[in-house]
Amino acid sequence: MIVFRYLSREVLLTLSAVSAVLLVIIMSGRFIRYLAQAAQGLLEPSVLLMIMAYRIPGFLQLILPLGLFLGILLAYGRLYLDSEMTVLSATGMSQQRLFVYSLAPATLVALLAGWLSLGLAPQGVEQVARILNQQSAITELDTLVPGRFQAMKNGSRVTYTEELSEDRGKLAGVFISEKRFSTDGDKERGISVLVAQGGRQEIQADGSRYLILENGYRYDGNPGQADYRAIQYDTYGVLLPKPEVEAEVTDREAMPTRQLLGSDKGRMQSELQWRLSIPLLVFVITLLAVPLSRVNPRQGRFLKLLPAILLYMAYLALLIAARGALDKEKIPAALGLWWVHGVFAVIGLVLLYWETLRLKWAARHAVQGVARG
């Protein structure tokens, strides 16, 4: 029992450290992406933290299996390097018993990953989709910040205002620059620049919003050329475009698991099997990680780390490829993703019993050699 607690503690501590680092890395990259969208006016800054919070379960459901895999490799690798595993082996600790001991933290991780995959992650995806839909309903005036040039429509439109009322209904000192394209949208025909002393927002009966500019000028032309046109106006209406927020999720990813259970469509079946694969993945990678963690103290603890990571990547890549094939109904739902788990479970069993099989094979050949002698 003491050895069991010691091994479990080493694995869980390493798992927690590795998962925390991976979560910070992934969240930082995603937050930078959302921050860039907020800077372009595609998202309101106030929703960034909410989106990140709802995305955490989706990140963790994939991070935890990888964290466990690396945790076993690093924790047990250190024990082999410090010859602690040699001492445990001398007291009867075999690879098979080590795997049985490793199933305790693996079961804990599998339960947590299953809860995230089957419950929390779809709910988080649904909330993110709801927030993005709300953001798609806003206009550039809702995200405009006074004193800052704001790019919209992939940089083809730039808006600036010196002052903006609290209700965002009135502006002062307005500047709008927009590229003009041909009717087919391929050829650029110049730039239109609008400047105005002030403006206000106006909502039409069909729900479209216009920015009504007052007391200003419009300039049409091409930069660097003298051919341009200047128009003075008292009032000028500008249609406010809606930010085009890129959708990150699909409807099936936000669908509750209980709804997937009653569907016979290939896409729904692949989503269900993917969610069920996350906790199953935990046990298979535990079967792979235990024998791969065995290292020679002279070779260092990181010798097998790169091949092990490549094996894990191959496992995950094959799961994703099988999921895509199941989406297109190229493979039957009964086969689905389960054959991938079966293949790597067999690989894990071969690795786990490889030393035992090798010793039996060597002993058999030795006996045969003595018999022939």
Image: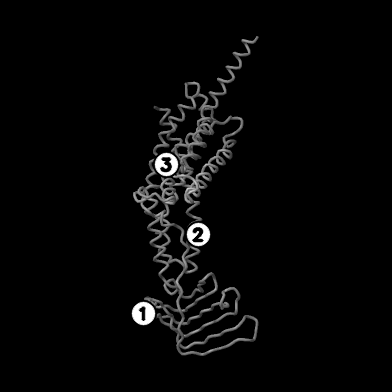
Which comes before the other along the chain, label 1 or label 2?
2
In this rendering, the label closer to the viewer, 3 or 1:
1
Question: Disc 1 to disc 2, how far (Cα)?
Answer: 38 Å
* Residue under pointer 2: 32
Please, what secondary structure does the residue beneath circle 3 have? helix
Q: Mark 3: which amino acid?
A: Pro
Question: Disc 3 to disc 1, how far (Cα)?
Answer: 52 Å
| Spot occupied by residue 304 in the image (x, y as percentages of width and height) | 58, 36
* Mark 3 crowd level (few <14, some 14–19, many ≥20, 10 Å Cα): many
Question: Answer yes or no: do the residues labelled 1 and 2 have beta carbons within 8 Å?
Answer: no
Which comes before the other along the chain, label 3 or label 2?
2
Question: Answer yes or no: do the residues labelled 3 and 2 have beta carbons within 8 Å?
Answer: no
Q: Mark 1: which amino acid?
A: Ala
Res 280 label: none
**Which quadrant does the C terminus fall into?**
top right
Coloring applied to the structure: one colour
Please, what secondary structure does the residue beneath circle 1 have? loop
| Spot occupied by residue 152 in the image (x, y as percentages of width and height) | 50, 71
* Residue under pointer 3: 279
* 159 is higher (above) or lower (below) than 272: below
**Which quadrant does the N terminus fall into?**
top left
* Residue under pointer 1: 205
* Mark 2 crowd level (few <14, some 14–19, many ≥20, 10 Å Cα): few
Q: Residue at x 58, y 88 (%)?
A: 229
Q: Mark 2: which amino acid?
A: Ile
